[in-house]
Structure formats: structure tokens, C-alpha cells
Image (tube, rainbow, N blue to C red):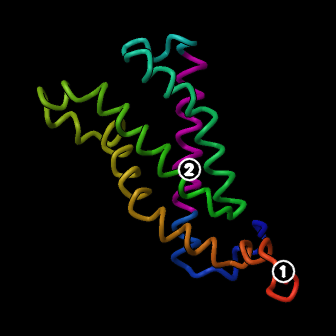
Amino acid sequence: MTAMQWGDRPVWVRCTASVYVVGFLEGTGAHGYFLATGGLDAYGYAPLPVQLLFHGLLLLDPLAALMIIRARPGGPLLAAVVMFADVVGNCNVAWSTVMTHPTAFLRPIGLLPITLFGIFVLLTALPLRRALASSGDIEACVPSPAEAG
């Protein structure tokens, strides 16, 4: 399956995949910006495992976007794992601020859009995976009964 063959997919699959790609490329840009402006200590406010996760997202975010663009059934699963870890890491860092100042969560940047995108990805990952797997890619790897026997 190539990017050129997306036209024969249902509209919901194309729209969902587009949201994934835009979201993960935006994440790539944000993490790249933070690394460029803050260096390796860009996430110095976070615990070391969260810092490593956030730096790792500079590789994982574009990988998830590429797998979706290439219509790989594993793409939505990788996306779900990445977003789960991203939301947990961001909540770990921001939770005390959210508890102290709940309206801080309502800003259009930061935790709110990350959480909303994460929820979207987690709710749509399995249906999108099924839609991508049903394209015939998997059947191409499985021999027909005549070939197997």
C-alpha cells in the first residue's frame, strides 16, 4: 500500500489517518524546537525517565506518522503506545500545576491538546488498524491453501 492508494479508503480512514499524521508531525516539530532552543536539558524540569521519553519522541513521532502514511497496520498501535506514554509523561510533569490551578489545563497549548489528541488516538487506534489490515496487505503475505498444501 502506498500513499497514492489512499483514495480508495473510506473517508473516516483517510480523515483519521490525516489527523494522526498532522498530530505526530506537530509533535515532531515541537520536540525538535525544544531540543534546538534548550539543548539536551530542554526538559530539565522533568524526571529523567520523562526527559528521555520526550527526547525519544523526536524519533517516535515521525516514525508513527511515516507508518500511517505508508498504511502499515502497526502504525496505529505504535501511535497509541507513543501517545499513552506522552500523556502519562506530561501529566506526571503538569499534575501539581493542574491541581493547584485547574484553569491552567484549559490553555490551547500544553496538556489539553496533548491529552485530547492522545484520547483520540487511543479510541481510534484499533479501528484504524483493522481498516489498514483489511486492505489485502496481510493476505499478500499468507499463501493460499493451494500454495500451502
Q: Give the image quarter of residue 148.
A: bottom right
Q: Residue furthest right?
A: 147
Residue 85 lies, in percent from the top left, at 43, 38
The residue at which mark 2 appears reads as 78
Quarter assignment of residue 144:
bottom right
Q: CB of mark 1 within 8 Å of CB of mark 2? A: no
Identify the residue shown where x is 53% and y is 68%.
128
Task: Give the class, few, some or many, for how many residues have Cα within 10 Å of label 1's Cα (few <14, many ≥20).
Answer: few
Residue at point 68%, 61% (across, down)? 72
**Is residue 117 shown above or below 3?**
above
- Where does label 1 land, which residue? 148
Q: Residue at x 68, y 64 (%)?
A: 71
Quarter of the image with the C terminus is bottom right
Amino acid at pointer 2: Leu
Q: Decide which of 106, 89 is in the foreground and name it.
A: 89
Report the front residue among 120 and 130: 130
Q: Residue at x 51, y 22 (%)?
A: 52
| Secondary structure mostly seen in the magenta stretch | helix
Q: Which residues are magenta?
A: 18-37
| Quadrant in which residue 143 is drawn | bottom right
Asked whether residue 127 is drawn in magenta, I would say: no
From the top left corner, tell me how far across and down residue 121 is, in percent.
Answer: 44, 56
Is label 1 or label 2 in front? 1
Q: Earlier in the sequence, mark 1 or mark 2?
A: 2
- Callout 2 secondary element: helix
Q: Which mark is residue 134?
A: none
Label 2 crowd bin: few (<14), some (14–19), many (20+), radius 10 Å: some
Amino acid carrying mark 1 in the image = Ala
Query: Residue 93 location, x and y as percent?
Result: 31, 25
